[in-house]
Image (cartoon, grey):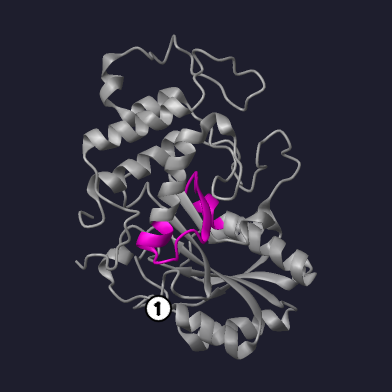
Amino acid sequence: MHLISNVAMTWTKKSHQEIKEIVFSALDKNVNYSTKGVLGIPASYLDDKVFNQDDAFLDNAPYISSLIKNPNHIGCHTRGSSESFFSGTQQIERDLIEMCAVDILKGKPMEFDGYVASGGTEANIQAIWIYRNYFVREHNAQLNEITILCSADSHYSMDKAGNLLVLDVHKVPVDLDTREVAEVDVLETIKTAKQQGKKYFIVISNMMTTMFGSVDSVQSYTNALAKEEVEYKLHIDGAYGGFYYPFTEGDTSLNFRNEHITSVTLDAHKMAQAPYGTGIFLIRKGFIQYANTQEASYVEGEDCTLIGSRSGANAVAIWMILTKNGPFGW
């Protein structure tokens, strides 16, 4: 297995003691429900008759302590102000997003937004939602002019997104032996979509499919899209392979070095062995605001996420796994 190359200093291995100190320091910077009233804050403390907050083992359990402290990471913390009551663990989430975008997916520092989602399904829908709104606002596109383009082996979240966002889905057939997507089939699928009035394409390329572990050739998509001269945005579904494939392939175009790729889904509760609820959405800056819900006026910094309120402990869990192992212990 290849080690990940050119690792930046954002991601470094830490001892258990270092991890404890960082997490507990972050929790100390969050609002303390025991000493401060929380009415008017998008937060709530856990029922202490059920969730004992005095157990001695919490002193040596930063993740469990994060669960008990129950920080609400509502909103997206990589783009300006957020709820100041949880600034400590929000910084851990920002550090995590930077690790994933820069150290794993080879992007440039400080050029990405993102958040810890409920899973890969949400992260994929988030990407499609953003690009739908982008085409509508920037190109005056009608919904019936926008389509999702993916392979026949893509995750069912593409169909779910099409249903939720009122978009058609066009699927490229795959080779039944290799599960590969051929450029000629992508071309034919695009032509069929264009005949049906589609002008704008939200493209999903797989970094290991759920059922077969197969990896799409992203060039098969980008070459065909260029030949057909259509507007598109390209998302990588790395929910299954995001914490595996980048470490096994030393030279790959499935990362942010590829200028055609705008966003990526990772899913820590698969290969990274994190608790459920630890999907990751990453996107180049300048796009996540297309999912901004300005009506969320009570949320400091507003809300650009699909899920809204979410547990800060999930970000802590992924960050702990990455820093405990380090980039070369993966």
Taking depth in this image into account, of 321 and 162 the one nearest to the observer is 321
Taking depth in this image into account, of 180 and 23 the one nearest to the observer is 23
**Vertical relation: 86 (above or below) 111:** above
Q: Is residue 282 magenta?
A: no
Q: Residue at x 42, y 25 (%)?
A: 28
Give residue 160's position: percent from left, percent from top.
59, 55
- Quarter where residue 127 is shown: bottom right
**Vertical relation: 274 (above or below) 35:** below
**Can residue 49 be seen here?**
yes
Residue at the disc numbered 1? 180
Give residue 44's position: percent from left, percent from top.
56, 21
**Bounds of the magenta segment:** 100-124
Residue 253 lies left or right of residue 281; in this view the side is: left
Residue 293 lies left or right of residue 109; in this view the side is: right
Q: Residue at x 64, y 48 (%)?
A: 304
Taking depth in this image into account, of 327 and 246 the one nearest to the observer is 327
**Vertical relation: 86 (above or below) 269:** above
Q: Is residue 112 magenta?
A: yes
Give residue 311's position: percent from left, percent from top.
49, 34
**Can residue 210 be seen here?**
no
Q: Residue at x 38, y 71 (%)?
A: 215
